[in-house]
């Protein structure tokens, strides 16, 4: 059970302590004992606020995980979520906990869409799939998810077959509901708008995306860039399981690679072994090994039609759903 309170970083504590010390010293020089006391009290306020916030989140997590995982949700996951089905038993339990924490902490708002349980589960399952191997991860950079009733264009008009998802650096993820449902319906076509958009948030460095998974050290980042440069020609020729959409932009390459890692793990491992191993190390998950364990075998790679370029977005790859 993941009930530990979200950690406050050592860096934050050290910064606060240093700030309080410097402030007290300065005030002490000019205002004497009572000035020091007052400045210490002021400096303690952020510490109290951080501690309070951490305690509130801890209580919310405990409440979210207190009851057994709902059987109806479990049935929905079995029906919809291929990654959940491939997981070993212990990781499946962690996935269920992660899902409930995400649902408890991240607002999911419908824009012209009723946000029913099934949709909330699909959103949370998208994020939980990516972060399952990182026990302390809590999607700090994600503020809200907006669900749209259809694809949209760059003016956020619906019904235009342009964008099916978008991730913003300030922490908003937009997902088209038909595209999200289609992503889960077809679990092995290396297309998943949920994985794609949440992968962009993993790439978020301060206020921008840079196409390098956050947390990679210099050596891993260099290796990532080398592998990417080797993969791109094959993608441009349409001979890769990696969507050609990711060949024109390092940011999109990362998102497309994440989609393939979870949706076409066996193909990625066989045909793009170095990239697969980098992603195994990064995500601390080995979906191809789990597919081996459940007896899956490779299928032929599907040819991909070329698509126009876009940034921080995901266009749909197939005809619109009739429902
Ligand atoms: Zn994108």
Image (cartoon, rainbow, N blue to C red):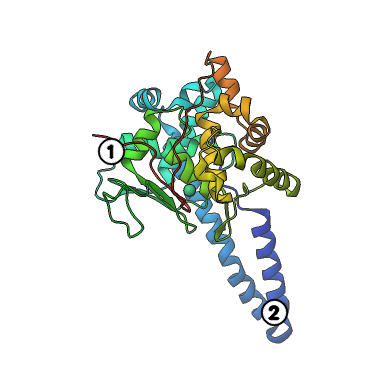
Mark 2 or mark 1, which is nearer to you? 1
What's the CA distance linking mark 2 and mark 1?
59 Å
The answer to whether the residue bearing label 1 lies less than 8 angstroms from the nearest atom of ligand 1 is no
Q: On screen, 143 above or below 286?
A: below
- Callout 1 environment at 10 Å: few (<14), some (14 to 19), or many (20+)? few
**Residue farthest to the right, as pictured:** 219
Residues marked 2 and 1 touching at CB (< 8 Å): no
Tell me if I can see residue 101 in this picture.
Answer: no
Density class for disc 2 (Cα within 10 Å; few <14, some 14-19, many ≥20) is few
Q: Earlier in the sequence, mark 2 or mark 1?
A: 2
Residue found at x 64% / y 53% = 9
Residue 79 % position (x, y): 36, 23
**Whole-percent x, y for residue 281 in the image:** 67, 35
Q: Is residue 239 left or right of residue 30?
A: left
Image coordinates of residue 290 in percent, x first then y, are 57, 21
Q: Quadrant of residue 99?
A: top left
Image coords of residue 142 (percent x, y): 47, 51
Q: Which of 300/274 is in front?
A: 300
Which one is nearer the viewer's eye here, 218 or 39? 218
> In the drawing, what numbered circle is on residue 33?
2
Quick one: 27 or 270, which is closer to the camera? 270
Q: Which mark is residue 116?
A: 1
Residue at position x 64%, y 43% from top? 228
Quadrant of the frame with the C terminus: top left
Residue 208 image label: none
Disc 2 under 8 Å from ligand 1? The reply is no
């Amino acid at each position: 059970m993941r009930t530990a309170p979200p950690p406050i970083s050592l860096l934050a504590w050290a910064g606060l302590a240093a700030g309080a010390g410097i402030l007290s010293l300065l005030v002490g020089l000019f205002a004497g004992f009572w000035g020091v006391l007052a400045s210490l009290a002021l400096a303690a306020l952020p510490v109290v606020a951080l501690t309070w916030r951490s305690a509130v989140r801890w209580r919310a997590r405990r409440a979210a995980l207190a009851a057994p995982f709902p059987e109806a949700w479990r049935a929905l996951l079995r029906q919809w979520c291929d990654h959940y089905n491939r997981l070993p038993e212990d990781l499946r339990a962690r996935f269920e906990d992660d899902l409930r924490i995400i649902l408890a902490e991240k607002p999911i708002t419908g824009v012209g869409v009723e946000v029913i349980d099934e949709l909330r589960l699909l959103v949370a399952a998208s994020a939980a799939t990516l972060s399952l191997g990182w026990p302390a991860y809590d999607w700090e950079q994600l503020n809200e998810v907006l669900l749209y009733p259809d694809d949209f264009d760059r003016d956020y008009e619906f019904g235009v077959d342009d964008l099916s998802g978008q991730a913003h650096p300030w922490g908003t993820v937009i997902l088209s509901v038909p595209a999200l449902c289609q992503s889960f319906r077809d679990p092995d076509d290396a297309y998943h708008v949920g994985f794609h958009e949440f992968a962009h948030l993993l790439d978020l460095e301060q206020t921008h995306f840079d196409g390098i998974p956050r947390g990679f050290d210099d050596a891993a980042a260099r290796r990532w860039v080398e592998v990417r440069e080797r993969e791109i020609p094959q993608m441009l020729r349409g001979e890769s399981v990696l969507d050609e959409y990711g060949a024109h932009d390092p940011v999109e390459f990362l998102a497309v690679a994440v989609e393939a890692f979870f949706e076409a793990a066996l193909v990625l491992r066989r045909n793009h072994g170095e990239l697969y191993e980098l992603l195994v190390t990064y995500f601390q998950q080995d979906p191809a090994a789990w597919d081996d364990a459940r007896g899956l075998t490779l299928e032929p790679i599907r040819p991909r039609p070329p698509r126009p370029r876009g940034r921080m977005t995901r266009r749909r790859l197939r005809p619109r759903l009739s429902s």
